[in-house]
Amino acid sequence: MDLDDLRLTTAHALVAEAWGERLPSADGPSTPYLQALIDGLCELSLKDPLTGLHNRRYFDAVIESEIDRVARTGEAALLLMIDIDHFKQVNDTHGHLVGDAVLKEVARAIRSCMRPMDTVARYGGEEFAVILPACQFSFGNRVADRVREAVQAIPIETMSEQSLQVTISIGGAYAIQWIRSTPSVWTERADDQLYQAKAGGRNRTCIDEPRDSTVTAEEKNMLLAPLSLSSGWGDLMPGQTFSNGSSH
């Protein structure tokens, strides 16, 4: 197969660098090679090139799916928003190469604290997001603190051969069980907690208390009100019973 004729030279180089020997030879059958090339490009399009984590596009797809799952099953799910403290100061003081090293090391530390089923993504700039399905309420603070401590323990070499330590602030929120919410609502709740962690002095975690999704008696009445009106029940006075016309 002539890669130049198909203008695949750049695509081949990108996938070959990421996949290595997993990429079939271009000299072999064309179908397996082209399918592998397509799969490799799709995989790369969902990853952040600097940290190797999933990118925002992948995160947006997963959070939609997780909200659907929580609404159907009622299982707990935790969203963590993580921000590197004073990251601009790191760039201004030590340069962008050190800043890139900080992003890579923080990403590696976060990933090391998570399960294979968890989704870790670079949300943007120096901010990361983690979706933890089936994470019980009692574990949220412990997981977040474990990540925070793992990052704080990382020594990062600077251009002046000095060791630099960075910290992170973490905000978290549980998805509302049995209710079809939206990604923006869930993310905003976790972001609010991140803001509180930063306002409280940074290098700390704040997890929102799980929201009660049980339906109260008042809410049940509101839900049943249209049914009551359509059946004539809406005309009843408080304490009055419905009569079928016969006397007892």
Image (cartoon, rainbow, N blue to C red):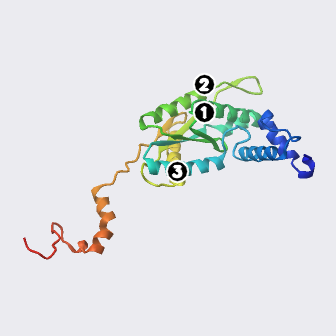
Residue under pointer 1? 110
| 153 with respect to 35 (left or right) | left
Q: CA distance from mark 3 to mark 1?
A: 21 Å
Q: Which mark is residue 153?
A: 2
- Horizontal placement of 175 versus 106: left or right? left
Mark 2 or mark 1, which has the lower sequence index? 1
State the residue at coordinates (56%, 33%): 115
* Whether residue 185 is situated above or below residue 44 in the rendered picture: below
SS under mark 3? helix
Which percent across, then down, holds residue 114? 57, 33
| Residue at the (87%, 41%) spot, across then down | 26
Residue type at mark 3 is Glu
Alpha-carbon neighbours of circle 3 within 10 Å: few (<14), some, or many (≥20)? some
The residue lying toward the viewer, choosing from 157 and 114, is 114
Q: Is residue 102 above or below residue 237?
A: above
In the orientation shown, which residue stands out farthest toward the front?
29
- Mark 2: amino acid: Ala
Name which residue lies at 51% across and 45% down. Answer: 190
Q: Quadrant of the C terminus?
A: bottom left
Give the residue pinned by disc 3: 188
Earlier-in-chain disc, 2 versus 3 = 2
Q: Secondary structure at mark 2?
A: loop
Q: Residue most toward the bottom?
A: 245
Query: For the residue marked with disc 1, what is the amino acid?
Result: Ile
